[in-house]
C-alpha cells in the first residue's frame, strides 16, 4: 500500500531528481560539504533556488505532505476504534489535498522557472571554458603575490598576508576543479537539455493529476465519515430505548441492595 502511495507522489519530484542526479552523479565523493555547496552556488542550480522561488517551496510542501500521509496511515494502523480518528484523519487529508491543489495552481510559474534553468545551463556550458582560463590567470597572479611576499619586512603583516593568499589560491584551485568537473558532465547536460521539454511537460501533468487524485480520495473519506455519522444518528432511537430499559435494571439493583441492608442485625432490632 505504501509503495503504491509513494509511486503516485514520486512523480512530483522526478524533474528535480533527474536534473540534480545528472549534475551531481559523477562528482567525486571525496569533496567536502563546502565543495558541494560551492558547486551548487556556482552553477546556479541549487535545490534551494528552484524550490523557493516561483515554485513557492514546492519541495518542502511535498515533503510535509508525505509525512502527513504517513501520520494518517499510522493513525489508522494503531487505532482500536476508527470512529475516534475519522475526523482528524479527514482534516489531515484535506490539508494535504489543498496543498497539492495549490502546487498545481503554481504550474505556470514552475514551468517558467524550469525553462529558465535550462537557459542557465546552456549559458554555463558556453562560458565554462573561458571561466576556467580566467580563474587560472587569477590563481597565477595570487601565486606571484605570494612569491613576492618575502619582501615584506614586518613579520606579522607578512604572516597575515601569506595566510590570506594561500587561502585565496586554494579557493581558486577548487573553483577550477569544480568547473572542470562541470565540463566533464557536458554530454549528460546536453542530453538533459534535449529531453527537457518532455520532462517538464510530464512533471506539470503529474502535478495536475496528483491534485485530482487526492481530491477524489478526500471525497471518498468524507463520504464514509458522513455515512457513518448518519448511521449513528439513525441509531439514536435504539440507544434511547436501551437507556430507558436500564431504568428497570437500576430499580431492581436498588431493591436487591435494600434487601441486603435490611438483613443486617442493626435493622432487625
Image (cartoon, rainbow, N blue to C red):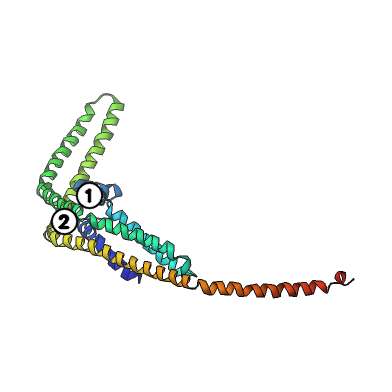
Q: Does label 1 or label 2 sit earlier along the sequence?
A: 1
Q: Do the residues labelled 1 and 2 touch (CB within 8 Å)?
A: no
Q: Estimate the x, y position of residue 165 in percent, counting from the top left.
A: 24, 35
Mark 1, secondary structure of its residue: loop
Residue drawn at the location 35% of the way across and 57% of the way down: 64
Residue 69: mark: none
Q: Residues within 10 Å of mark 1 (few under 14, many from 20)?
A: some
In the figure, is residue 250 to the left or right of 261?
A: left
In 3D space, how far apart are the residues under numbered discs 1 and 2 (Cα atoms)?
27 Å
Closer to us: mark 1 or mark 2? 1
Q: Estimate the x, y position of residue 87 in percent, counting from the top left.
A: 43, 63
The residue pinned by badge 2 equals 185
Asked where in the image residue 141 lies, by quadrant, the reply is top left
- Front-lying residue, 137 or 218: 218
Residue drawn at the location 28% of the way across and 27% of the way down: 157
Asked where in the image residue 151 lies, by quadrant, the reply is top left
- Front-lying residue, 15 or 180: 15
Quadrant containing the N terminus is bottom left
The residue pinned by badge 1 equals 54
Say how many tags the image has. Answer: 2
Amino acid at each position: 500500500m505504501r509503495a503504491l502511495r509513494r509511486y503516485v507522489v514520486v512523480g512530483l519530484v522526478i524533474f528535480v531528481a533527474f536534473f540534480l542526479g545528472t549534475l551531481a552523479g559523477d562528482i567525486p565523493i571525496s569533496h567536502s560539504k563546502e565543495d558541494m555547496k560551492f558547486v551548487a552556488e556556482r552553477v546556479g542550480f541549487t535545490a534551494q533556488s528552484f524550490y523557493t522561488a516561483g515554485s513557492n517551496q514546492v519541495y518542502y510542501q511535498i515533503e510535509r505532505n508525505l509525512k502527513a500521509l504517513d501520520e494518517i496511515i499510522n493513525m489508522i494502523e494503531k487505532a482500536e476504534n476508527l470512529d475516534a480518528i475519522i475526523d482528524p484523519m479527514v482534516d489531515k487529508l484535506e490539508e494535504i489535498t489543498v496543498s497539492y491543489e495549490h502546487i498545481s495552481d503554481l504550474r505556470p510559474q514552475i514551468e517558467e522557472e524550469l525553462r529558465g534553468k535550462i537557459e542557465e545551463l546552456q549559458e554555463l556550458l558556453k562560458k565554462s571554458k573561458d571561466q576556467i582560463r580566467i580563474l587560472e590567470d587569477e590563481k597565477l597572479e595570487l601565486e606571484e603575490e605570494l612569491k613576492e611576499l618575502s619582501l615584506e619586512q614586518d613579520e606579522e603583516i607578512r604572516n597575515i598576508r601569506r595566510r590570506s593568499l594561500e587561502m585565496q589560491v586554494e579557493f581558486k584551485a577548487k573553483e577550477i576543479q569544480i568547473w572542470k568537473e562541470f565540463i566533464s558532465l557536458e554530454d549528460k547536460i546536453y542530453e538533459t537539455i534535449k529531453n527537457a521539454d518532455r520532462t517538464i511537460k510530464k512533471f506539470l501533468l503529474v502535478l495536475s493529476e496528483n491534485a485530482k487524485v487526492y481530491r477524489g480520495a478526500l471525497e471518498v473519506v468524507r463520504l464514509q465519515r458522513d455515512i457513518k455519522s448518519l448511521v449513528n444518528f439513525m441509531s439514536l432511537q435504539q440507544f434511547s430505548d436501551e437507556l430507558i430499559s436500564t431504568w428497570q435494571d437500576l430499580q431492581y439493583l436498588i431493591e436487591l441492595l435494600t434487601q441486603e441492608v435490611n438483613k443486617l442485625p442493626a435493622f432487625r432490632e
